[in-house]
Amino acid sequence: MRELVEYIAKALVDNPEAVEVEEIEGKQTSVIELKVAKEDLGKIIGRQGRTARAMRTILNAASTKLNKRSVLEILE
């Protein structure tokens, strides 16, 4: 899941070197924290949160296939 979020984020931003993804594993749920450069934050969130919602939808679909639950947190 970590690699999936990292790949999508790096494709969206202007500064891909600043993308940091950290995965915190639990028994049933894993939390994926995404950090990007301050100027790229708007590109990750998108208009009215559409891009972030789409990333969460893709993540949920992929994690459902693995019988897990994943949560995407976008950090500033």
Image (cartoon, helix red, strand yellow):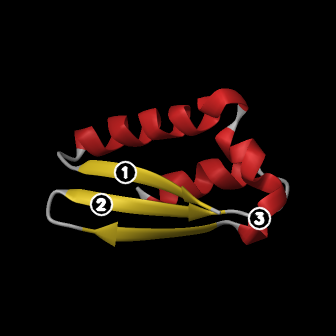
- Compared across the picture, whether 48 is left or right of 2 comes to right
Q: Using the image, tell me which numbered label, if any, was put on residue 6.
A: none
Q: CA distance from mark 2 to mark 3?
A: 23 Å
Q: Earlier in the sequence, mark 2 or mark 3?
A: 2
Which residue is at a point 21% across and 49% down the rendered structure image? 68
SS of the residue under disc 2: strand
Query: Mark 3 — residue?
Result: 37
Q: Amino acid at mark 1?
A: Val
**In this rendering, would 45 be left or right of 37?**
left
Residue at screen point 52% across, 33% down: 53
Looking at the picture, which amino acid does disc 2 mark?
Answer: Ser
Question: Mark 2 — residue?
Answer: 30
Q: CA distance from mark 1 to mark 2?
A: 6 Å
- The answer to whether 29 appears left or right of 59 in the picture is left
Residue at the spot of label 1:
71
Q: Classify 11 as above or below 47.
A: below
What is the x, y in percent for residue 33?
Answer: 49, 63
x 61%, y 29%: residue: 50
Mark 1: secondary structure = strand
Q: Is residue 49 above or below residue 8?
A: above
Whole-percent x and y of residue 64? 25, 39
Mark 3 crowd level (few <14, some 14–19, many ≥20, 10 Å Cα)? some
Question: Relative to 70, does residue 50 appear above or below in the rendering?
Answer: above
Work out which quarter of the rendered image holds the C terminus and state it: bottom right
Q: Please provide percent x and percent y for residue 45.
A: 66, 42
11 vs 19, nearest the viewer: 19
Say few, some or many: other residues with alpha carbon within 10 Å of mark 1 (under 14 / 14 to 19 / 20 or more): some
